[in-house]
Structures are given as C-alpha cells and as structure tokens.
Amino acid sequence: MTIVVKIDRENIDEAIMIELSHIIKNNGTVVFPTETVYGLGANALSDIAVAKIFAAKGRPSDNPLIVHISNIEQLDRIVEIIPEKAKVLMDKFWPGPLTLLFKKKAVISDMITGGLDTVAVRMPSSKIALKLIEICDLPLVGPSANISGKPSPTTAEHVIKDLDGKVDAIIDGGDCEFGMESTVIDVLNETPMILRPGSITLEEIAEAINTVIYDPAMMHNTIIAKSPGQKYIHYAPKGEVYLYIGEADDIANAINQAAARFIDESNKVMILGTEENILNYKEGIILNLGSRTNPMEISSNLFSMLRKADELKADIILVEGVEEEGLGVAIMNRLKKASGGRIINCGDSA
Ligand code: AMP
Ligand code: MG
C-alpha cells in the first residue's frame, strides 16, 4: 500500500518528515517533490533499497541514478575528490537543478552508476527534498518518479497515476517550480560537457566556467551518448508524437494540414502549440504550451501537457518545436525523444 501525505513547503511538518525518514532508513521508497520534477527516493547506500527503485520504475539497469544530497559532508562520503571547476559550479548553482559527475567512492554501488566509475550528484533547492535528506542524513537516489519511458511527473497526481501501489509513500508538495529535469554536466575532462540539457542553460554555465560544450552525441543521435539515459525513448505519451520544426508560420500551416488528414482517418488529434500560433489552429484538441518568448513557461507546462494527451486518449499529438537555444535546447531534447524520431522540417528555412 502507498501512503500519500500532503506537506506544505512553507510550513513543513517535522513529525511527518521523521516518519518518512524511517521508511527510507528501513530500505523503503518515498517519492518527494523537487524544484525540477518529483523524485523517487531511497537510501543510496543500500543495494536493497536501490534495487526497489529500478523495479518500481521498470528502469533499464544500465541507466544510472542521480544521488541527492543536502550538505557537502554527504558529498565527501560518496566521492573521491571535488575538482576546482565543480566547486565553482556548486558555489553558483547549488542548491539547484545542476547535476555534476564525480569519481565515486566504493560505497556507491555499481547498481547506481550502471557500472560506471563516476556518480552523478546534485543538491536540490526544494525545501521538502532538503528536509527529507537532512533528517535521513543519507544520500538519496532520486530518479524521476514515473514509469520508465513516460513523461516526468510534475505533480503528485502524475506520480500516483504511475506508481500507486509500487512505492511506500508519496509526498504531495504541490507543483514543481521548473517542471524540467536538472542539467547533467561532466567537468572531469579538459572540456566540461553537458550530457543532458536541463533547467540550467549552457549560457548560464558558461558565465561561471567560460568553456562548456554539449555532448556531441546528445545533439546527433548517431554517436553513443556519454549519459546512458540519453539513448532511451523517453517522455512519450501513448499516442504518436510528431514534432514540427522551422518558422512559426510554416509550422502552423503544416500542423493544420496534418491535423485535417489525421482527423479524416478517424484519429483523435491533439495540438500542442505556442501562444503566438494558438489562434491559427483549426481542428483537434488545442493546448497552449506558453509563449515562445518565455521558454520557462513552456518547459514547466511540457510534461503535464504530454500527460494530458494520455488522459484525453489522443492518438496523434502534433507539437510545435521551439528555437534550440537557452532552455529551448532542453525542451527540444525532451520533445525529440517523445517523438521517437517523428520530426518534420517545415518550409525552406528549416
Ligand atoms: P533521471 O534519473 O530520470 O533524472 O535521469 C538521470 C540522468 O542522469 C540519465 O540521463 C543518466 O544517464 C544520467 N546519469 C546518471 N549518472 C550518470 C553518470 N555516472 N554518467 C553519466 N550520466 C549519468
Ligand atoms: Mg527520468
């Protein structure tokens, strides 16, 4: 049975958090809200607990987990050294949605890292997440609390849909602030590399450490990605997702034509459009992702709208792509994965 408890992030009930920490200490699983998405928490120092995470999510064993900490002493327990560049980034972005790779100590099992000798760590800024980790005084693994392959959960309702009966407890702490996962960065090599784009942009990181690039494999699916999770189809609703890229006007025309065709073939069609284009759409269930001038709005709406497609039993989901810069890189990374490669270039300019 899964217990669901509401916690007010501005007035955290310490007694309930202590109860929840007992579940973690006894190798159980507790879902907690973070500023990015909801995480599925368990003791990172226990193989029994970690195995439960992979089982609950149906996650492939070679897709490593991020370890969440609430203070630097916990980091020292699990990593060999903290490189200078990592210190600079931790100073600037922790607590917050940046995950860094470190050389792991032996206490971190291969099960967490998928056999890699590095461990991915972050310190979340969510008060509820920090409180839970602090009371447990343990590093916690915390992958997104969804069934593997589904869009990440940004509300407790999303988590309940996927994991009710499969985890011991779920903390309902309201909507997640960013709605997009953390950025994963590797600073262990000469040139720091973003392995997974996320809530912190390359531009923000470059302000702190000058040189930083995207893992070439992340942008071009032909090369093997350094971040194992990047190779899986992810974030996908049950219906087929088609991603349209190019100029906004061309996209609207192409989506309208496709919608008419799919509806003719008796499909239930959903359109995820941007505010600028929304009045141009004619048929289908039309949802507004947010303004092209406000990628933060689009990123925080994205997963819940992809989940809406399942709720409304859409067969076909036609999505407007956005510019691949800043937060748009992370948005497009998720949409490309959700589309499973169904990407349509519109107009001459694309
Ligand atoms: P999730 O837990 O769903 O947020 O996904 C975690 C992401 O972090 C996946 O894309 C993993 O591949 C990545 N990751 C975790 N640990 C490592 C590691 N040691 N090296 C590279 N990528 C990692
Ligand atoms: Mg995930």
Image (cartoon, rainbow, N blue to C red):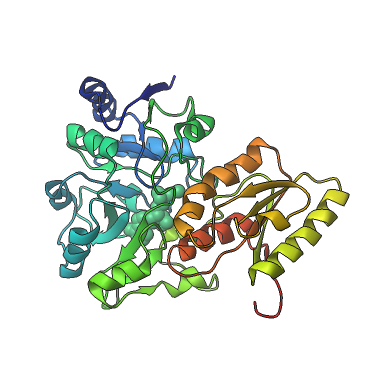
Figure quadrant of the N terminus: top left
State left or right for residue 241 relative to residue 323.
right
Q: Position of residue 200 (x, y in %)?
A: 35, 60
In depth, the one of 308 and 77 nearer the eye is: 308
In depth, the one of 153 and 108 nearer the eye is: 153
Is residue 54 depicted above or below 283 in this figure? above
**Residue 60 appearing in the image:** no
**Residue 248 appearing in the image:** yes
Q: Quadrant of residue 190?
A: bottom left
Q: Quadrant of residue 350?
A: bottom right
Q: Looking at the image, which residue is at 30% across and 73% down?
A: 206
Q: Position of residue 314 (x, y in %)?
A: 71, 43
Q: Position of residue 132 (x, y in %)?
A: 25, 33
Toward the bottom, the furthest residue is 348
Ligand 1's quadrant is bottom left
Q: Looking at the image, which residue is at 54% across and 57% down?
A: 291
State left or right for residue 112 relative to residue 73.
right
Q: Position of residue 71 (x, y in %)?
A: 16, 46
How many labels, in total?
0
In depth, the one of 75 and 317 nearer the eye is: 317
State left or right for residue 113 relative to residue 280.
left
Q: Looking at the image, which residue is at 21% across and 24% down?
A: 14
